Amino acid sequence: MIAYLLRRIAYALAVLFGVHLVTFTLFFAVNTPEDQARLQLGRRVTAEAIHRWEAEHGYDRPLYFNAAAPGFGKFTDTVFFATTRDMAELKFGHTNEGLDISYEMRRRFLPSFLIGIQVFLLAVILPVVFALGMVLFRATRLDAAGVAFLVVLMSISTLFYIIFGQYLIGKLMQLTPVSGFARARPEAFLILPIFVLVLGSLGPQARLFRTIYLEELGKDYVRTARAKGLSEWTVLLRHVLRNSLIPIVTNAGAMLPIVFTGTIITESFFAIPGLGAFTIDGITQQDFGIVRAMVFVGSVVTIGSYLLVDIVYTFVDPRVRLE
């Protein structure tokens, strides 16, 4: 078990380093230090001002290899090494406006977490239960109606859910605010975004789980369980659901990053000051410090989620071996 965990952690760190290397290369290929200086100081800025700006931000060194430095300084006295060290220490620098990125991320974490954790729990549990209900009443009108409902949900864009929800629930019925966020009373502002996100994910996930359950129902162990006199509901819960946990855990792992990184589109439409909206701000304002920090955090959370999924596999399915 320990050896397996160490291998998976080493693999995760290697992938994270590769992601950081690629994103660093892309960011500095698209937006060189000189371009960043001109973006902040103005297009007609002097060369002396550009050099001074680069020195203040640590960009007055080579990107990857410093031939003039002695010994290991050829690799450590570079922009890439300094950036990697700062990222590992969660020091992300400052925005174009001079704000501390690490502080802004901590300040914006709560709204994203409040949305993400509830969406995660509901979006994992509801499709499983909904699909079990359809399979229990399979080949009936109720099952057909459920499938039709899921197809309709899958056919509609999430943007429609957002706009329709804001108009119907927020404006006409006035049950929740249309947008915004208040820390003193956050639940009123989170109901609508959570409803939209859960509804948008219900269709494809419940349809997938229904297909998986139906496939499991045709296997020999299910026929054996029925021959022993077990009820259909007991067969579904005790046998079919247990043997379908692998895709359920995989789906949960894929959704886990939104708990920590936010939802970009939803937070932007609902004017929620979370990490997703922070990412959009960085993109629209061409603030590459914000974008690079959010890409790094997103990579850490995503890789960590799949590492956790690999570990959980060994507990939910004994057929998976730590080899």
Image: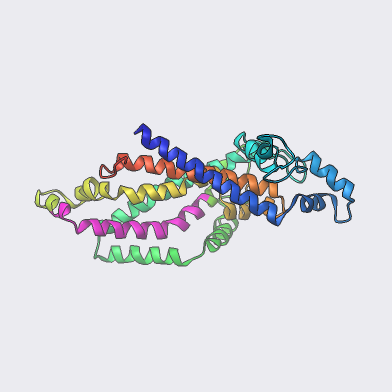
What is the basis of the colouring in this image?
rainbow
Residue drawn 26% across the image and 46% down it: 242
Residue 46 is left or right of residue 16, and the answer is right
Residue 229 is left or right of residue 136, and the answer is left
Looking at the rendering, in which quadrant would you find the C terminus?
A: top left
Residue drawn 80% across the image and 40% down it: 55
The correct choice, above or below, for 188 with respect to 152 in the image is above
Give the x, y percent position of residue 178: 61, 53
- For residue 202: magenta? yes
Looking at the rendering, in which quadrant would you find the N terminus?
A: top left
Residue 117 is left or right of residue 319, and the answer is right
Which stretch is magenta?
194-223
Give the x, y percent position of residue 152: 42, 66
The correct choice, above or below, for 85 with respect to 268 in the image is above
In depth, the one of 225 and 52 nearer the eye is 52
In depth, the one of 267 and 186 nearer the eye is 267
Give the x, y percent position of residue 221: 16, 51
Magenta: predominant secondary structure element?
helix
Q: Picture quarter containing residue 215?
A: bottom left
Residue 303 appearing in the image: yes
Residue drawn 88% across the image and 52% down it: 45
Total label count?
0
Residue 115 appearing in the image: no
Give the x, y percent position of residue 321: 29, 42
Residue 33 is left or right of residue 125, and the answer is right
In depth, the one of 194 and 275 nearer the eye is 275
| Residue occupying the far top of the picture | 2
- For residue 323: magenta? no
